[in-house]
Image: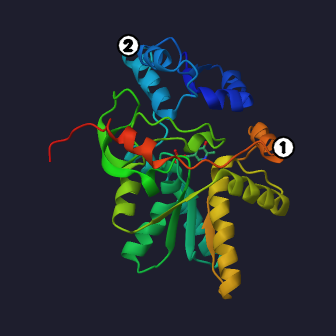
Amino acid sequence: MECRVYMVKVSYHQKPARAMLIRSFGAEVYPSPTDQTQAGRAILAQDADTPGSLGIAISEAVEAAVTSGGQYKYALGSVLNHVLLHQTVIGQEALQQLEMAGEYPDIVIGCTGGGSNFAGIALPFVRANLRAGKATRIIAVEPASSPSLTQGRYAYDFGDTVGMTPIMKMHTLGHTFVPPAIHAGGLRYHGMAPIISELYNQGLIEARAVHQLGTFGAALQFARAEGIIPAPEPSHAIRAVIDEALHCKATGEAKVILFNLCGHGHFDMSAYQAYLEGQLEDFAYPQAMIDAAMLSLPEVPA
Ligand SMILES: Cc1ncc(COP(=O)(O)O)c(C=O)c1O
């Protein structure tokens, strides 16, 4: 069966080796937005130089699937609750591994894009907090340039840019939000999965936003200590881990911190190059642009 991948344009150019890996296994990879779909053409007509976004790529993929007469099926990798639950095998394993080590975490940390990766490590520990009297702090870390949990509104919104998916109640920056071209491509998404949004809403998890320079600083510190080059996405979590560890050092407390190293950075050498050559900058998404994107939220009767 033919497999077609719409890859966010900026990631396609930042991580050419990742596209090549996908092609090696027989799929065709297109930098999104493309001129193959109505969604892509409409977005290119507004801004021919758009870096693309996960929301736009989802619109293109959904359109390609529904107009293919059944030739293509569409698979979403994050955001939807069933995907989050599927990923919890990560946290279940972590629980057992820690038990074998005779430990239990005081803090669990993961990075969040659409939410499935964070949910994967975090949800089994949320359950233990709710059902087994544990008191683990659980921290979601997102980029300051795409801060859906810490600055988005909790409202019904579409999962894609054009508005083809069902609406979901989630923390959102607005489905028309096009995030800046930071190197953590997997975290450039306007919304947050409904389960994670509701846990945050109820105060059962914490969230924090970090900048990319501090993130890459943490990534290099980790690489030099552990011999593993992390992807820019989990480097957000590493930033928070180091900050929590430094806080413990200052207060003299001993804490067990668990985090999810959800990807190596071998395909992200151009990002490391940009950082090491001083070409990266921090970018906090301006509130005025978030407010503007909020105007596109669908109207839902109360
Ligand atoms: C390496 C890596 N980590 C984390 C994420 C974020 O995952 P999620 O969308 O499940 O939050 C991604 C998304 O593409 C990724 O590529």
Q: Please count the marks in the image.
A: 2
Q: Position of residue 128 (x, y in %)?
A: 44, 72
Q: Is residue 68 above or below residue 248?
A: above
Residue under numbered circle 2 = 67
Residue positioned 46% across, 23% down in the render: 61
Q: Is residue 86 left or right of residue 270?
A: left
Please name the amino acid that badge 1 sits on. Glu
Q: Nearer the viewer, residue 183 or 26?
A: 183
**Image spot of residue 152 (x, y percent):** 40, 51
Name the residue furthest front: 288
In the rendered view, tell whether residue 254 sits above or below residue 233: below
The three-letter amino acid code for the residue at tag 2 is: Thr
Q: Which residue is mark 1?
A: 277
Mark 1 burial class by Cα count in 10 Å: few <14, some 14-19, many 20+: few
- The part of the image, by quadrant, that contains residue 64 is top left
State whether residue 285 is above or below residue 29: below
